[in-house]
């Protein structure tokens, strides 16, 4: 099974259009040791021909242009695409706005939880994806299914599972108390398995906490992509970017006693890769002490174009 990191940044990308923080300003200046990043998404293929996307980021058009595997085949007529299905892990803009790039009457399947498919159903702009060509399929938490594109199965099984998280930013309901109206199915992780070989990996780009169920599920995994949004809970406040903590936006921080490095220290996950990295995160600077600490603890930092075979 082939995995390509199409994008590795959190919502807004890196640099973010309106951000003049130190990281964004320096990457624009071309300072050494910083790479621009598009918004988080993976492409996965079991047979090298049919590809599925894990989320469709607002940068999808650029990502396709930079990824020959996702471009139309030369010998299959005037219109075709190797992209057969999109699996959505949440309803945030950075996870699904790229669906609009996939218009133009191309057959496709979109998989989401009931909660996320309701977002598509309640926003008529997504009807640009003609329902007679683009199937919307409900994923049920804890129930694995074989991914089917318009031409049939693509050799990949997905198991969606709930992780602690938050409802999409634009659906937050302040009157609903601390959870802001978050319900099960708003934020999920995916176990992605190659049918036949059983080789698999986990994709968890959004996670608010490694609770007991998440730890049990991920323990001993061979490969994990995990929420790397922030290094410290208050870094966006400290940098004057936004008055919200990581806790408030539904993302764990990497460092500290309650952080991701600590949470996974004893879980025996063989290869661990941070993704969905916010423009404020010091690990974006390849020579920073924070980047050194992350790598010393056995974590990698995803970059756009990263390719992995499992
Ligand atoms: C997030 O992951 O917190 C969201 O992408 C926020 C956003 O919509 O920008
Ligand atoms: Mn996001």
Image (spheres, rainbow, N blue to C red):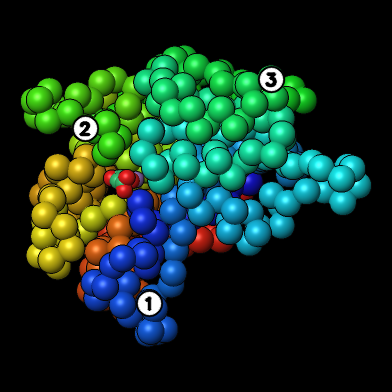
Q: Secondary structure at mark 1?
A: helix
Q: Secondary structure at mark 3?
A: loop
Q: Name the spot of residue 217 as percent of width and height, x first.
A: 34, 28
On the question of residue 241 being in view, the answer is: yes
Q: Name the spot of residue 129 as percent of width and height, x first.
A: 61, 30
Quadrant of the rendered image containing residue 103: top right
Quadrant of the rendered image containing residue 49: top right
Q: Is residue 92 left or right of residue 238?
A: right
Residue topped by disc 3: 132
Mark sitting earlier along the chain (3/2): 3
The residue that appears at 56% across and 21% down in the rendered structure is 136
User: Which residue is at the front of the view, 9 or 181?
Assistant: 181
On the question of residue 291 being in view, the answer is: no
- Rendered position, 36 above or below 150: below
Q: Judge depth for marks 3 and 1 and give the one in front.
A: 3
- Rendered position, 231 above or below 33: above
Q: Name the spot of residue 36 as percent of width and height, x first.
A: 44, 69
The residue that appears at 28% across and 67% down in the rendered structure is 19
Query: Which quadrant would the N terminus be assigned to in this image?
Result: top right
Q: Quadrant of ligand 2?
A: top left
- Cα distance, mark 1 to mark 2? 32 Å
Q: Residues within 10 Å of mark 2 (few under 14, many from 20)?
A: some
Quadrant of the rendered image containing residue 284: bottom left
The residue that appears at 52% across and 31% down in the rendered structure is 126
Q: Name the spot of residue 122 as percent of width and height, x first.
A: 42, 23
Task: Using the image, tell me which numbered label, if any, was put on residue 27.
Answer: 1
Residue topped by disc 2: 172
Mark sitting earlier along the chain (3/1): 1
Badge 1 vs badge 2, beta-carbon distance below 8 Å: no
């Amino acid at each position: 099974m082939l995995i390509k990191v199409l994008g590795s940044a959190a919502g807004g990308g890196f640099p973010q259009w309106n951000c003049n923080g130190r990281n964004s300003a320096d990457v624009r200046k071309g300072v050494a040791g910083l790479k621009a990043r598009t918004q988080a998404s993976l492409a996965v293929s079991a047979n090298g021909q049919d590809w599925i996307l894990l989320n469709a980021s607002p940068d999808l058009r650029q990502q396709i242009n930079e990824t020959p595997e996702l471009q139309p085949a030369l010998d299959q007529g005037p219109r075709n695409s190797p992209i057969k299905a999109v699996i959505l892990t949440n309803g945030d803009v950075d996870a699904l706005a790229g669906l609009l790039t996939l218009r133009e009457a191309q057959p496709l399947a979109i998989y989401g939880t009931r909660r996320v498919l309701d977002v598509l159903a309640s926003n008529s702009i997504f009807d640009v994806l003609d329902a007679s060509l683009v199937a919307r399929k409900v994923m049920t938490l804890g129930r694995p299914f074989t991914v089917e594109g318009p031409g049939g199965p693509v050799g990949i099984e997905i198991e969606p599972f709930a992780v602690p998280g938050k409802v999409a930013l634009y659906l937050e309901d302040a009157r609903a108390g601390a959870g802001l109206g978050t319900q099960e199915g708003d934020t999920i992780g995916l176990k992605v398995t190659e049918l036949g070989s059983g080789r698999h990996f986990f994709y968890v780009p959004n996670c608010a906490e490694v609770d007991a169920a998440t730890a049990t599920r991920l323990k001993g995994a061979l490969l994990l992509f995990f929420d790397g949004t922030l290094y410290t809970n208050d870094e966006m406040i400290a940098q004057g970017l936004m008055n919200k903590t990581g806790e408030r936006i539904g993302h764990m921080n990497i460092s500290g006693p309650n952080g991701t490095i600590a949470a996974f220290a004893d879980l025996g996950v063989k290869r661990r890769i941070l993704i969905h990295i916010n423009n404020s995160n010091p690990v974006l600077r390849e020579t920073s002490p924070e980047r050194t600490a992350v790598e010393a603890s056995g974590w990698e930092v995803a970059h756009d174009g990263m390719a992995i075979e499992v």
